[in-house]
Amino acid sequence: MTSQSKAAIAEALAEARERTLALIEPLDDGQLNTVYSPILSPLSWDLGHIANFEELWLVQTIGGREPLNGDLGSFYDAIENPRRIRGELPILRDSELRSYMADVRERTLDVLEDVEIESDVEDPLLRDGFVYELLLAHELQHNETMLQMLQLVEGYELPDELAERFSPRIPGTTAREDGESVAIAAGEYETGAPARGFAYDNERPRHAVELAAFEIDRAPVTNGTYISFIEDTGAEPPLYWRHDGENWIDTARGRRAPIDPGAPVVHVSWHQADAFARWAGKRLPTEHEWEAASDRLDGVGHGWEWTSSDFLAYPGFEAFPYSEYSEVFFGDEYKVLRGGSWATHPRVARPTFRNWDLPRRSQIFSGLRCARDA
Ligand SMILES: [Fe+2]
């Protein structure tokens, strides 16, 4: 990499930070410190964690510098500090928090000037600027978690860039019969991220999987079809939906917005998604089926799509750069989601990206598309 790529890194870091700050711009310090839900952090924790993670990797680890605030980092460890207790921690708040974020960034840019990030450097953290891509992805993914929390803030208005992406119609779906599907032939399919380029450890190694012939819906399930399912079975509505006596309305962010029947459904749990698929006479795709069909699918990027797959290591998995990113979550407790949502930054969403969550969760922007055996 050249000094020009360093400039590109600095610019991408600045853009990510701008997006983070745009998200909290309408809020006061009191709102940043409020715990709105036991399963979501107060925003001040997220902000401090974003900066602390940056300090840990880009300043301490690769820059060899001492932490700015002694042991403060321990309060921002996501594994050590479960979400329900984060509001009680002696974390940085208000102006102290803002100056910490700025101080870390200054040091990050200082260190960036001196490090070698060419493709032939020995350290895999620095090779091709991996650790910078990691940090960008981390901040942008926390933006999405923050947006999950912001759904609980009454009157919260999305920044323009996200307001545009929120609730788009799936191109072409209105002209298409619900349930139109794509046939995928039986065979061996490559799955996972190639060895070069940025990806998380859980996306590697790329390997072949054997798939039986299947069909997968060209479009994700819409609100309209989901309403038929609720009315037919008495199933729970998606999170934030209320019935006002006549219609279903969306109450996220304190709104009372009519539900758009043509938009993909979001805020459903894995259990709801699985029940829907069975009601429709279909099933959820496996994550490998989803990936094999991903270049044929419409409507990706509105809501994360639940798959039937448990979050497991690919054969030959190696934890990198630390086992707490994904390895500690492997097992049958978590289900894999694929695609991305309106709140996912395009830099994060890629066909091999594996998101995971507990099957009961619906505060995430999660929907589904159905599949069936051919
Ligand atoms: Fe994090």
Image (cartoon, helix red, strand yellow):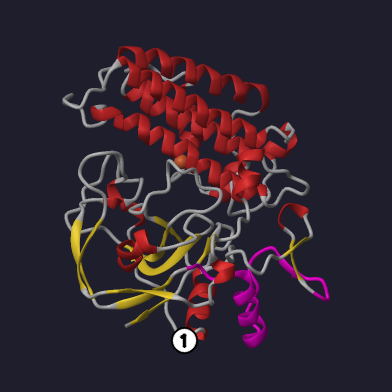
Q: Is residue 349 or residue 144 the one in the foreground? A: 349
> Could you tell me which quadrant the N terminus lies in?
top left
Which residue is drawn at the image coordinates 43% and 34% (left, top)? 136
Q: Is residue 77 visible?
A: no
Q: Amino acid at mark 1?
A: Gly
Q: Is mark 1 within 8 Å of ligand 1?
A: no
Which residue is drawn at the image coordinates 31% and 22% (left, top)? 62
> Could you tell me which quadrant the C terminus lies in?
bottom left
Q: Is residue 87 visible?
A: yes
User: Where does residue 242 sit, x and y in percent of width and height?
Assistant: 75, 69
Residue 223 lies in the magenta stretch: yes
User: Where does residue 348 sit, x and y in percent of width and height?
Assistant: 42, 44
User: Where does residue 293 sit, x and y in percent of width and height?
Assistant: 34, 65
Q: Count the marks: how many?
A: 1
Residue 252 against residue 31 in the figure, above or below: below
Q: Provide the secondary structure element on which disc 1 rests.
A: loop
Provide the residue span drawn in magenta. 219-246
Q: Splitting the image into 4 quarters, where does residue 56 fall? A: top left
Residue annotated with mark 1 = 281
Q: Is residue 307 or residue 35 the one in the foreground? A: 307
